[in-house]
Image (tube, rainbow, N blue to C red):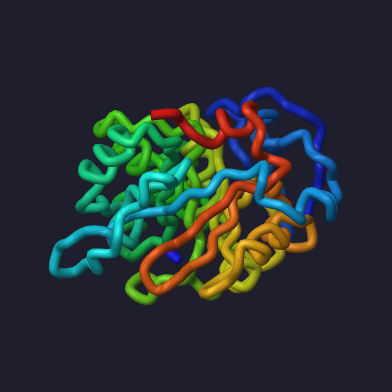
Amino acid sequence: MIPRMRPRRYLRLTLPALVAIPALTWVLVVRNSDDALALNPEGTSATTVATTKNTLSGQDISWPQCTTKTSKGLPMPTSDRKFVVVGLTNGRAFTTNPCLSAELAWLRSHHALGAAYAMANYPTASHLKSYGSSGPWKGTTLDAKLRNVGWAEAEAAVNLLRARGFASPTVWIDVEGSKPQPWSTSTQNNAYVLSGFINGLRNRGHKVGIYSTVTAWKKIVGTGHFSVPEWRTVGMNKTEKDLLTACTASRSIQGGTPAIIQRGSATVDHNRTCPATTTPKMIAQFFHQY
């Protein structure tokens, strides 16, 4: 793998109370109270950003760590990693990470904090035909069909979690470009897919976070804001200081609270929790202790 409206607090959304996307570029999804972190709206202070003392180091892994012909055989995390985020998919929605069982075994044997992420994609014609009319929205319009496909992507991800006994309080949705299965040129239509995905995860009892970059999000979703916690990436060959700087409100992707920051290298994606979210309550919201 490589700003914010604060609505009033509401009870968890149930199936009939699904998120509606207005016919504007601004996408408002009412947050569950669990998703709305009680933090200073201006983000972390300059004092907090200056040190990694109160943060946790981690790594994300998925199909690139596999040793199959189509994978890269990249290294697994070192034993000092406090948390690991494991990819469920093999680069696209409706696929399975071929090393998922082995990577979960590593997570359990090392007793690390664990969480899951899954790719979101714009549907192919086949996916639209298969799932467009088989969800909670009446699939008579394109926007309803796209929401239903997003819902189905969430169902596929959660079914994998359940089948493998993978506990992950928050499931992170990976929103980035994909050459094999590109997003549409309509940011509104792309947002419909993500809305369905978010609702699908919440319907199955999971909290939701978004992994992306400001650039990717703007290209795919435009100015749409879901205001859920963010797993941000600062790119390749950055420093620990760059990670902490990215924990500030000015680096917001879609109006959510910064939770995890990633920096890449040739072989490893290094991650670190943000200081303001490295509390027992927040860690329990994002991870399961194995």
- Is residue 78 positioned above or below 176 on the image? above
- Describe residue 101's horizontal placement relative to residue 290 as left or right: left
Q: What residue is shown at x 25% (from left), y 51% (from top)?
A: 96
- Of 270 and 149, the residue lying toward us: 270
Q: Indicate the quadrant where residue 250 lies.
A: bottom right
Let me know if residue 187 appears in the view: no
Q: Indicate the quadrant where residue 75 lies.
A: bottom left
- Of 128 and 277, the residue lying toward us: 277
Position of residue 130 measured from the top left corner of the image (x, y, whole percent): 29, 51
Please identify the quadrant where the C terminus is shown.
top left
Position of residue 143 measured from the top left corner of the image (x, y, whole percent): 53, 55
Position of residue 117 measured from the top left corner of the image (x, y, whole percent): 43, 48
Let me know if residue 181 appears in the view: yes
- Describe residue 162's horizontal placement relative to residue 213 as left or right: left
- Of 231 and 82, the residue lying toward us: 82
Q: What residue is shown at x 21% (from left), y 44% (from top)?
A: 102
Position of residue 71 measured from the top left corner of the image (x, y, whole percent): 22, 66
Q: What residue is shown at x 86% (from left), y 50% (from top)?
A: 42
- Is residue 117 positioned above or below 120 on the image? above
- Is residue 241 positioned above or below 77 on the image? below
Q: Indicate the quadrant where residue 67 lies.
A: bottom left
- Describe residue 79's horizontal placement relative to residue 33 as left or right: left
Residue that lies at the very extreme toward the left in this rendered image: 69
- Is residue 24 positioned above or below 40 on the image? below
Residue that lies at the very extreme toward the top in this rendered image: 11
How many dots with numbers?
A: 0
Q: What residue is shown at x 46% (from left), y 37% (from top)?
A: 136
Please identify the quadrant where the N terminus is shown.
bottom left
